[in-house]
Structure formats: structure tokens, C-alpha cells
Amino acid sequence: MKAILFDMDGVLIDSEPGYHRADAKLFAGLGVPFGAREIAAMTGANNIVIANLITTWHPHLAPRRDEIAAAYEAGLYDALRDEVAGLIPGAMTWVLRAKEAGIKLAIGSSSSNRMVYHVADTFGLTPLMDTIVTGEMVKRGKPNPDIYLRVCEELGLPPGDCVVIEDSPNGLKAGRAAGALCAAFHGTNRSGLDLSSCDMSFDAYTDEAWARLTEL
């Protein structure tokens, strides 16, 4: 393992509860249902993919696609800013441990530039990362592999030398499609999403989980 590629939401920060409340508010405003199907399909995807999903499910909303994408991102940013006060316990320990071991570090997130850099700057991650790639920096978001392929390109490493840490099916699909090994973090998976397509899984940033990660 030469690099760890962290997703952000649900992996470095516990943002999903606030995001789900913002999503529910958006869907209520649109007059369409929000439930398990929507959570499963949307988690880990960017605002463009999600606006496309919503207008596919509800074709009468198609003329409002751009408006929906903007409203979705704005709601998530407000939830992030107002509700997330720190990193998931143990996440920084892993970041510092990897740094000390000479393992390269990256964030590969579907979220917007302002959301990712709000987290990275606020919680001291920016100077520790070798690169950061957001959903705005690629043409296709997760579950497509573009974000992780861009990360690997910027690190100068083949995907097979990298481990992706993800908390969503969309993210794991992206890591797999890029050719990286995948570790599923279950610690924030309150919706019971299927995270079985991984090389290992863990639910806390413990010494035992770190040992298993380094053996992949």
C-alpha cells in the first residue's frame, strides 16, 4: 500500500444525518417522496448525478434540473457548516500514522470544492494531503471512477498500489472501477447500505483495523 484515498462524507466526517435532513427538506419542497431508495442511490454521488436521478424518477421536474442541483448542494453545505464539529474519532490518528509511515494521502470526494476545502481547512487536513480531488474537478462523479483515477494520476501511482476508504456503494463502485483496493467503513452506515463489494471492512479507526488495512 503506497497511498490511502479517503472519501470525505461518512469516512472522515459524520455528515450523513445532516445531509439526509437536508435531502428530506429538498424532496418535500419538490413534492416528491424521499426514502430508502433515494438514500441508497444518492449517497456518495454528486449534485449533478443526484439532480439527474431526481428528474429521471420524476420527469415533470426535468426543466428544473439545474435549480435542483444548486439547491441540493446549498442544503448540504449549510448542514455541513452548521452540524459537523470535527473529524470522526480516530481518523486523524490514521492520517498521521500514514504520514509517518511514508504512505501518500488523498481526499477523493464527490462534494463541491467549497465543501471539501471547508472540511480540509477547518480540521487541519489540507497540509497533510498529497492531493485533493473534488467532484467539480472531473467530468463524471461516483460511481464512475474519474475521481479516483485523477487522484492516482496526481499521486503518480497506479491504482493497484492504492487503498480507497469508502462508506457507500457508489464510492466502492468508483474505487473498484478505478482498479484500487477498497476498504468499507461501516461506522456511519445507519441506512444499512450494501457495502459488501470490498476487500476489507471496519467500523472504527482502531489499531486492529489499521493492521488489517496495511496487510491488503
Image (cartoon, rainbow, N blue to C red):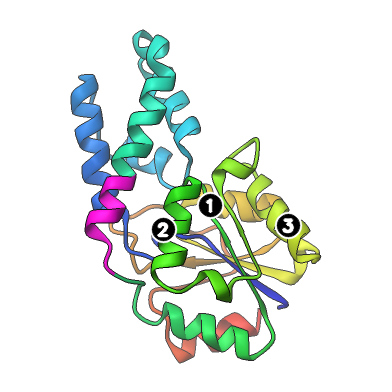
> Relative to 97, is 30 above or below?
above
Task: Give the residue type at disc 1.
Answer: Gly
**Residue drawn at (45%, 74%), measured in percent from left and top?**
124
Which of the two residues, 44 or 195, is positioned nearer the viewer here? 44
Residue linked to disc 3: 179
Q: Is residue 160 left or right of residue 192?
A: right
Task: Give the residue type at disc 2.
Answer: His
Disc 3 crowd rating (10 Å Cα; few below 14, some 14-19, many 20+) is some
Is 26 contained in the magenta span? no
The total of numbered circles placed on residues is 3
Q: In the rendered structure, find residue 146 and report the number of the disc placed on it.
A: none
Task: Give the residue type at disc 3.
Answer: Gly
Cα–Cα span, label 3 and label 1: 13 Å
**Residue drawn at (55%, 88%), measured in percent from left and top?**
97
Sequence order check: which comes first, mark 3 or mark 1?
Answer: 1
Is 81 contained in the magenta span? yes
Disc 2 crowd rating (10 Å Cα; few below 14, some 14-19, many 20+) is some
Sequence order check: which comes first, mark 1 or mark 2?
Answer: 2
SS of the residue at dot 2?
Answer: helix
Q: Single out the mark in the foreground, 2 or 3.
A: 2
Disc 1 crowd rating (10 Å Cα; few below 14, some 14-19, many 20+) is many
The secondary structure making up most of the magenta span is helix
Residue linked to disc 2: 118
SS of the residue at dot 1?
Answer: helix
